[in-house]
Amino acid sequence: MRFPERVRIVEVGPRDGLQNEAATVPLDVKVELVDRLAATGLASIEAGAFVSPKWVPRMADSAAVYGRIARRPETAYPALVPNMQGLEAAFAAGVAEIAIFVSASDGFSLKNIACTRAESLERLAPVAEAAIAAGLRVRGYVSCIAGCPYDGDVPPADVAMMANALAGMGCYEVSLGDTIGIGTAGQIRDVIDRVAAQLAREAIAMHFHDTYGQGVANVLAGLEEGISVFDSSVAGLGGCPYAPGARGNVATEDVLYLLHGLGIETGVDFGAVAETGGWISDRLGRANASRAGSAHLAKSGDGDGR
């Protein structure tokens, strides 16, 4: 079986990870996390979100984060935006790439952003149009590709419908997310095949949560399907406030360990990411959810990454 020669990792820990922390994360810690991750060779780091502080209070200081990080010319720092107000805030912060998001299920869409799938597409169309007109790159997310905490099973055809709609808006890439982490390898292959019937595999990314411990297995399934872009989170940070029981994202360290073991190039320093995972876990007072990262730190005698 032929795997992609090179894989791009989109690091989502500073946004998708930290937005779910129970306690406030100091601005200095957020900035240092992004800068540490950029120094590892990661080419894309989602550094924040311009969303309502009422609903996602941990992202309220995203403008300050973008104002203080040491932006590297070779690194992309996308921001999540839900609407025109968020886009205007991203403009003001000097963001060069945004991510917009929809759900493959109506139940999750209504709970997450208080509108149906169709209404979410209507809301986002002018956002994507304005961003592209201003020279920003636009990436799309589709949530709940393997199941919804409110609607149950999600047909692959619904995932494909939403992915195609985002591509039609001009998204250069669409990330398919197993938001509640229940997908298995066979199911993920079926979803990819259905989406890829209309959307080039080069324009598809995958975003896995590890609730049932299937994150790395699903990354392997994605590789087998020709996918070469994966979202992941340092130390397995994350979850979802609107998906009860959802665990963190698949850990960047675990994905890197798999990829490097297969001889796939990433341009990322695994050891440096592991050290960063130990560091942020220590700062947050939480267990490091990366198995590979924890093992590396234990072997090196640097259990907290300092």
Image: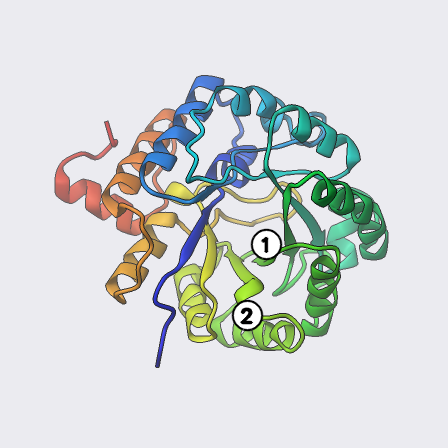
Query: In the displayed structure, would residue 30 be above or below residue 213?
Result: above
Q: How many marks?
A: 2
Q: Quadrant of residue 260?
A: bottom left
Q: Quadrant of residue 223?
A: bottom left
Which mark sits nearer the N-terminus, 1 or 2?
1
Mark 1 Cα within 10 Å, few/some/many (few <14, many 20+)? many
Q: Which mark is residue 103?
A: none
Q: Under tag 1, what secondary structure?
A: loop
Task: Check the picture and name the quadrant holding the C terminus.
Answer: top left
Mark 2 Cα within 10 Å, few/some/many (few <14, many 20+)? some
Label 1: which residue? 179
Q: Quadrant of residue 286?
A: top left
Q: How is the image coloured?
A: rainbow
Query: In the displayed structure, would residue 188 be above or below residue 96?
Result: below
Looking at the picture, how far across and down is residue 175, in whole percent? 58, 57
Q: Under tag 2, what secondary structure?
A: helix
